[in-house]
Structures are given as structure tokens and as C-alpha cells.
Image: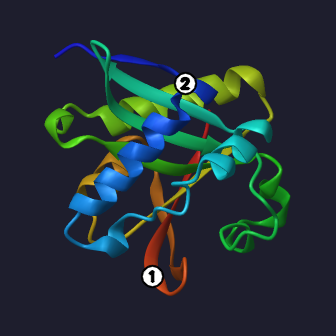
Amino acid sequence: MKFIIKEGSINDIKEIIDAIKYLHDIIENKEWYAIGLADYDKILDKLNDDAIIVKALYKDDLAGFLLVERHINPKHELAEEIPKDELSSSIEMDNAGVLPKYRGNHLQESLILKAEYIIKERDSSIKYSYATVHPDNLASLKSLENSGYKKYREKLMYGGKIRYIMRKELI
């Protein structure tokens, strides 16, 4: 299969929300996948604050997506784990999903690398990228590790759910 990985836009929000809800519905362990961004206004607010959407397309079908926050809110629980001197030069890989029929094609890795490229092109001061993943979500964990992320910390987050905080120093 040949995929196109490119930046998305406001026009993609509804389709991404539908995908987030669908992925949450079918996932066996609901703790693995947070759906806090399954809201149009939340995503729109993030896009207005310099977040980006990166999407993978197979023909005209959405195969996968990634939302990336350029500014990590200092009051967000992830920000508490980031050294203060890194916070302004850090991004967060916020919500990613690959639809089941397209899994096994390393799309999450491709989405991450494209997002890092886009962000660095826009702002060369970005030096770090963070993501969170449930320790048992081995596919996402492996995608992050294959993309250069290392386990940084383990913490209860998002209302008491265990997460690895993953960190990557961007070149």
C-alpha cells in the first residue's frame, strides 16, 4: 500500500473525531487510548494555538492521524514532568491513531517523523518532543521507540492511568 503523509487542517477535525471515537470503541483496554480530544472545539482551540494535524491517507481514506501540540500548557500534568528550561522548546505528540485495516505499515512512525519535520521547519528552537503511552500498549510503545523516543518516566496521569512519559531530543 502506498500512503500519503501530509499536514491536515481544520477541515479534517470531524473525520479525526470520528476516528478517535471509533478507535476507543474497538480497543480492548480502554485505558490505553484517551479520547479527551474527541471534541471539535478542543481540537480547534489547539490548532489556533499552533498545534498541527498530520494525517496518513490511502487513496482518499484516512488511514491514520496525529495531533501535535506546539505549546505545552504549563498547567498540564505533562508539563510538571518536563524540566522548566525545556518547556518552551518542547512539543507533545498528543493523540495518534491508525485505523485497523492500515495497521502494520509503520504509519504511526511515519506520522511522528513528518510532524517533527513540520514543527522543526517552522520553529528551529524546538529541541524536545514528549509523548505518553500506556506500558501495555506495545504497538504504540514500539512505534515511539522506533522513532527515537526513550522512556523518561512512569507516572499516573489522566485521572490515575499509568503512562510512560517518552522523550526524544530532536536534532
In front of the other: 92 or 144? 92
Do we see residue 70 in this rendering? no
Q: Quadrant of residue 9?
A: top right
Relative image position of residue 79 (x, y in whole percent): 73, 67
**Coloring scheme of the render?**
rainbow
Q: Looking at the image, which residue is at 78% across and 60% down? A: 73
Q: Which mark is residue 8?
A: 2
Relative image position of residue 109 (x, y in whole percent): 36, 36
Q: Looking at the image, which residue is at 55% across and 77% down? A: 158
Judge the density around disc 2: few (<14), some (14-19), many (≥20) Cα neighbours within 10 Å: some
Distance between mark 1 and mark 2 Cα atoms: 29 Å
Whether residue 110 is situated above or below residue 46 in the rendered picture: above
Q: Looking at the image, which residue is at 44% across and 35% down? A: 15
Amino acid of disc 1:
Lys
Q: Secondary structure at mark 2?
A: loop
> Which residue was labeled with disc 1?
161
Relative image position of residue 65 (x, y in whole percent): 42, 36
Q: Quadrant of residue 162?
A: bottom left
What number of labels is visible? Answer: 2
Q: Quadrant of residue 139?
A: bottom left
Q: Earlier in the sequence, mark 1 or mark 2?
A: 2
- Which quadrant is home to the C terminus? top right
Q: Which mark is residue 108?
A: none
Judge the density around disc 1: few (<14), some (14-19), many (≥20) Cα neighbours within 10 Å: few
Relative image position of residue 111 (x, y in whole percent): 43, 32
Q: Looking at the image, which residue is at 74% across and 55% down? A: 72
Whether residue 169 is situated above or below residue 21 in the rendered picture: above
Amino acid of disc 2:
Gly
Whether residue 31 is situated above or below residue 118 in the rendered picture: below
